[in-house]
Amino acid sequence: MMGRNSEELFWDLYAKLYDNLSGLLPYREEMREIVHEVECLLASQRGSDDATGSEPVLSLLDAACGTGYMLDKLSQVTTGVRYVGVDRSKAMLKRASRRVQACRPAKLLLDADLDGKLPFPDESFDVVSSVNTLYALRDPDAFLAEVRRVLKPCGTALIVNPWKPKLLPIWREHFATLAEWRDERECLRTVLLLPSFLAITAINAVIARRAKGKVYHFLEPGELAHLMQANGFVITKLKHEIYAGTCCMIVAQKK
């Protein structure tokens, strides 16, 4: 098991390469699906607010926002939302800050350890998203309890978590899509990013090995659903296979 400092260094190293994941077609497709789902959740919350005659000012927390990729994409398709991102990696937050500083609406980025208490009052957010984060936390139950605490009544959580510690499906789908598209620009991008892809593969091999050793929580979709239900959520959607079939996405409403 890595010590706290070693763990932080590990994720800081990943931060230097993380944005290059957007060069992988399965990653872009995964993020497209997630952004669309969050967009629908926000629209649903706004509809509920409209029905009660209140001002539809919404708030979203991205728990482990990484380099801000999702927040940036969301801000391009949604308006009237207060975005907050937290991450414990200062290197990730530094990159996220550069990405979102020119975007509107403004976003708040905070340094926070998701293994501890979230730095927000009860019932602060309409939606909480957390993508590929829960697996690396010490206590998933404690994290989900915190997510529930900071959600408003009837608020919604979107959790994406890996359940297959495999890399080959991602590469297989990437190159199959390249062959189908025959897009010269995408092929060139792949060639230019190959050194970064190899480094990312090495890091993900470490993650996969730790998952097999039960250090990380790679949960079957049913296990994740049970965990959410045990922490006071009602499942509204469960998609078993995204990111080339290696992750699942679950949407759940606070009871």
Image (tube, rainbow, N blue to C red):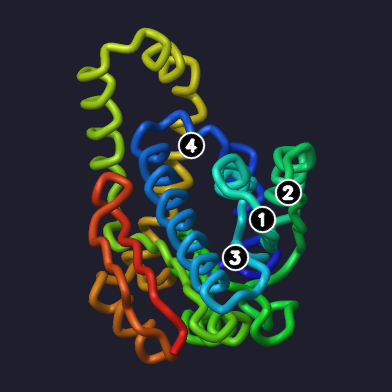
Give the residue number, with chain letter if any, for mark 4: 21
Disc 1: CA contacts within 10 A as few (<14), some (14-19) or many (>=20): some
Residue placed at 47% from the left, 80% from the top?
A: 140
Q: Mark 2 or 1, which is nearer the eye?
A: 1
The CA distance from mark 3 to mark 2 is: 18 Å
Disc ID at residue 236: none
Disc 2: CA contacts within 10 A as few (<14), some (14-19) or many (>=20): some
Give the image quarter of residue 90.
bottom right
Residues at circles 3 and 1 in contact by the CB criterion of under 8 Å: no
Q: Nearer the viewer, residue 110 or 150?
A: 150
The CA distance from mark 4 to mark 1 is: 29 Å
Q: Nearer the viewer, residue 157 or 231?
A: 157
Give the residue number, with chain letter if any, for mark 2: 105
Give the image quarter of residue 158.
bottom left
Q: Secondary structure at mark 1?
A: loop
What kind of residue is marked 1?
Gly
Q: Earlier in the sequence, mark 3 or mark 4?
A: 4
Give the residue number, with chain letter if any, for mark 1: 80
What kind of residue is marked 3?
Ala
The CA distance from mark 2 to mark 1 is: 8 Å
The CA distance from mark 4 to mark 2 is: 25 Å
